[in-house]
């Protein structure tokens, strides 16, 4: 995901390597959520700043670290001796569970493949005033808050029949992070059909329901810290449908997909 900071760390290291005339080697790995799908709004060049919003990428870029390194070097015109050691045997459509490799958590809250699959959706909501499961046994598998009506939110989301995913109410008390040591109600999210699950669409649907049911409690505006797309925020704010929200970024996303092709290393 654009907001996962391993890539921005690599980009900063690449810039220093270029300044100091150092060879830069990337030992590539599979993208754990696959490389076939590219989804969500593309960050505008004017908004490329900071550690999270570090490059003009869509939310889900569908690239490996090695492929991103090639794109960063070209876009930023880095005079860099870049070498990517390719991973062997991986195909773009494969998620991590299809590789036969053992999962090693890259950070404390991505400890399972369930969390990894849901991270693109739930992570998009993390900059608002909800718990996303940090400080629980289910990080990035839930959305909850002291003010949330979990059963009502689950009911509305299930009625929306979002492809590939189901919701059930739950009550938790996070031990750390947002709403630490507070009793929270919310929803647990389960991917029941990975072939149909669309995480960005799922996040937008959750946002629409939270705005509908908790307009005075949920800090919707905070979502733009991750989404970074005012037209989509305006469409959600106006109560537009999923297709209308996605239409706000369709043209820029198509342009990125075409440009991305020259940097891909796997098919």
Image (cartoon, rainbow, N blue to C red):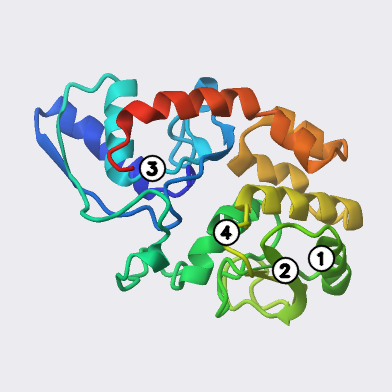
Could you tell me which secondary element the residue under label 4 belongs to?
A: loop
Q: CA distance from mark 4 to mark 2?
A: 14 Å
Look at the picture and state if 14 lies above or below 123: above
Determine which of the numbered discs, if any, sits on residue 166 in the image.
2
Are the residues flagged by discs 2 and 1 in contact, CB closer than 8 Å?
yes
Could you tell me which secondary element the residue under label 2 belongs to?
A: strand
Q: CA distance from mark 4 to mark 1?
A: 18 Å
Asked if residue 135 can be seen in this view, the reply is yes
Q: CA distance from mark 2 to mark 1?
A: 6 Å
Asked if residue 107 can be seen in this view, the reply is no
Q: Between disc 2 and disc 1, whose residue precedes? A: 1
Q: CA distance from mark 1 to mark 3?
A: 31 Å
Residue wearing tag 3: 63
Q: Position of residue 212 (x, y in %)?
A: 90, 52
Q: Between disc 4 and disc 2, whose residue precedes? A: 2
Determine which of the numbered discs, if any, sits on residue 158 in the image.
1
Q: Nearer the viewer, mark 4 or mark 3?
A: 4
Could you tell me which secondary element the residue under label 1 belongs to?
A: helix
Determine which of the numbered discs, if any, sits on residue 195 in the image.
4
Could you tell me which secondary element the residue under label 3 belongs to?
A: loop
Q: Between disc 4 and disc 3, whose residue precedes? A: 3
Q: Nearer the viewer, residue 225 or 236?
A: 236
Q: Quadrant of the C terminus?
A: top left
Residue beneath the point at 33% across and 37% down: 68
Relative to residue 24, is residue 155 drawn left or right? right
Determine which of the numbered discs, if any, sits on residue 59 in the image.
none
Residue beneath the point at 87% across and 40% down: 239
């Amino acid at each position: 995901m654009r907001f996962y900071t391993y890539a921005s760390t690599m980009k900063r290291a690449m810039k220093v390597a270029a300044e100091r005339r150092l060879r830069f080697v990337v030992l590539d790995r599979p993208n754990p959520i696959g490389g076939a799908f590219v989804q969500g709004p593309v960050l505008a060049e004017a908004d490329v700043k900071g550690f999270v919003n570090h490059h003009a990428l869509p939310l889900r870029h569908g690239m490996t670290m090695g492929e991103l390194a090639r794109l960063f070097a070209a876009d930023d015109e880095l005079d860099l001796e870049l070498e990517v050691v390719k991973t062997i045997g991986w195909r773009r459509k494969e998620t991590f569970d299809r590789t036969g490799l053992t999962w090693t958590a890259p950070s404390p809250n991505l400890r399972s493949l369930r969390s990894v699959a849901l991270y693109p959706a739930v992570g998009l909501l993390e900059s608002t005033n909800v718990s996303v499961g940090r400080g629980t046994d289910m990080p990035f598998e839930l959305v909850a808050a002291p003010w949330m009506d979990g059963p009502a939110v689950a009911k509305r989301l299930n009625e929306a029949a979002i492809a590939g995913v189901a919701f059930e109410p739950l009550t938790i008390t996070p031990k750390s992070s947002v709403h630490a040591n507070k009793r929270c109600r919310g929803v647990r999210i389960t991917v029941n059909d990975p072939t149909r699950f669309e995480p960005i669409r799922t996040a937008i649907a959750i946002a629409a329901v939270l705005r509908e049911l908790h307009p005075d409690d949920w800090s919707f505006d905070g979502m733009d810290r991750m989404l970074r797309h005012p037209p989509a925020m305006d469409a959600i704010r106006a109560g537009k449908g999923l297709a209308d929200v996605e239409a706000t970024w369709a043209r820029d996303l198509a342009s990125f997909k075409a440009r991305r092709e020259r940097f891909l290393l796997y098919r």
